[in-house]
Each structure stands twice: as C-alpha cells, then as structure tokens.
Image (tube, rainbow, N blue to C red):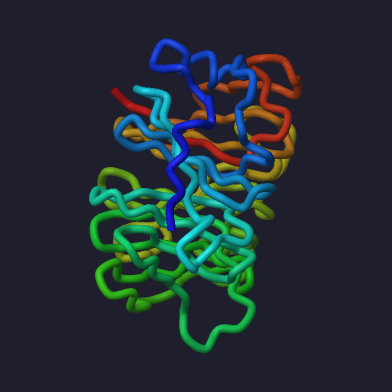
Amino acid sequence: MVEINRDIGLVGGAENALELLRGGAAHPQVGRPAGLAYRDGHLYICDTQDNVVHDWNLSNGEARRIGRTGGLTLVEPVAVAVDDRGTVFVADTGRGEVVAYSGATPRVFKPENRDGYRPVAVAVAGDSLFVADISTHQIDTFLVTNGRHMDSFGGVGEDLGKLYYPMGIDVGTNGSLYVSDMMNGRVQVFDRWHQPMFSFGEPGNRYGDMGKPRQLAVAGDGTIVVADAEFAHVHLFDEQGRLLLLVGGPTDEPGGTPLPVGVALAES
C-alpha cells in the first residue's frame, strides 16, 4: 500500500524544507503536481505523472509514496485529504473511486449504481467525507467509518445551489462547506445541512472575479484561499467573500503561479 522512501534525497532536513517549497531542491521528485493537503508537518502532493501521492515530512526530510504497492494502486490521483486519524483519502478520477489508505488494507468510496464516477476533490470533517463528482456536478457525502453513501447535492446549473464542474471543496470551522464552482467562476457556500447560503465571485476581469477556480482551502479565521488556473493567481477572500489579496502570477520564477490547481494551508 505505502512505499517508504528514505533514499529519495528529497529534503536534507528541516533547514532545507523552505528551499524545497521554493523550488530550490535539486530533485523535487514530483512529475506533475495536482491536489495538495497539509497536516501535522506533512505535505501531501498528488502526482498525476507517477500516479502516487507524495508524503513529505517537512521536519526531518523523509518522504514516502502512497498508492504504488499493496494490491490497490492509484491511476490518476488528483486530490487528497487527511483526517485526524491520519487516514489519507485520495480522489482518483482514473479509478473512478476515492481510495482511503489506513492500516494494511485500503478502502474505496463510491456511490452504488453510478456509472462514470469522476471524483476530483475531497474533504473530510469528523466522520463525514465529502467528494466532488464532475460526472454529475454533485457533492457526495459518505460516512467514513463504513463507507456508506449518505446523500448528494448540487447538480448541473447556474442557480444558487447548482454546480458546473465543482473542482475544489473544504469544510470551515463552523461546518459550512465551501465549493469552487469552476465553470460558473465562483465559490458557493453551503451550511452543515447542505443548503446553499451564498456565493461569491463571477466570470470577469475585475478584482474579485474568477476565471477557473480549482482547489480551495479555508483557514481557521475564515479566510478562503482559491487557486485560479485561468488567472494564474491565488485569491484570498474574507469569510463574506470579499477579496483581500492576490498572490502569485503567470511567471515561472519563484513566487509565480503559472497554472495553480492545488492549495493547502499550514497554520501555526
């Protein structure tokens, strides 16, 4: 299931972790990075070229690759989330499943009787697993403990509560669910009962507008961070959806974000 790689030579230790993140490492060992997650000093990176999830321990430089061995290998991992127990949930759009790695045997999450399932985003809070499916433009909720599919909401459309290619998902501290609605150029906010509350952003070229919002993350203070693949920026919004800051830009130099698709927050 998990291949431990102490010989990757990815990071020489905590003193080189920032150089790694800045692109200064000689061999970063990621072919085509996609979704990101961060928890307890570990940075998880989906790699759609090598078809693994990299787990980088930024405190000691050790690295492992998840999803290459153990009888259930990844095909196209595009998003990752980690729960309080250390279980790693991977949205694998190639397999058409979410794969959970914990212990000796991986588990899979997928709605019954749904052909062409294409999970592209995943978030976990408590015993609830949330998955964005672009085949139906819906968000699915599963029970982590037994994999039971609890409900679905969304569906294709432009009205509030409808989605058109949901590509990112995260849960706020109050239980609200934030979904990046890519082809509608906005972020939608749902309450803990999955009822739509409000949205912010729209297609356009003004500050606060969005092009192709992909993965997002919500900070503990309510700040919402959105990776925008079309505008080549990362947007920061407050909890009411008001623009705070633009980060990055269309450059390959350090600090640039020419095609951002993933984002993760490390809070002290």
| Residue at image location 46% in from the left, 48% down from the top | 3
Residue 266 in the image: x percent, y percent?
Answer: 37, 28
Between 19 and 26, the one nearer to me in the picture: 26
Q: Image check: 84 left or right of 259? A: left
Q: Could you say which quadrant of the image residue 249 lies in?
A: top right
| Residue at image location 52% in from the left, 62% down from the top | 132
Task: Give the mark count.
Answer: 0
Residue 265 in the image: x percent, y percent?
Answer: 41, 32
In the displayed image of the protein, which residue is found farthest to the front? Answer: 7
Instruction: Give the quadrant of the N terminus.
Output: bottom left
In the displayed image of the protein, which residue is found farthest to the bottom? Answer: 113
Observer able to see residue 180: no
Q: Image check: 151 left or right of 79? A: left
Instruction: Give the quadrant of the C terminus.
Output: top left
Question: Considering only vertical position in the picture, is 218 above or below 140?
Answer: above
Residue 134 in the image: x percent, y percent?
Answer: 62, 66
Question: Considering only vertical position in the picture, is 157 above or below 65?
Answer: below
Residue 120 in the image: x percent, y percent?
Answer: 57, 58
| Residue at image location 56% in from the left, 46% down from the top | 46
Q: Could you say which quadrant of the image residue 193 lies in?
A: bottom left
| Residue at image location 38% in from the left, 76% down from the top | 151
Q: Could you say which quadrant of the image residue 140 lies in?
A: bottom left
Q: Image check: 252 left or right of 43? A: right
Q: Image check: 260 left or right of 204? A: left
Question: Considering only vertical position in the picture, is 90 above or below 133?
Answer: above
Observer able to see residue 149: yes
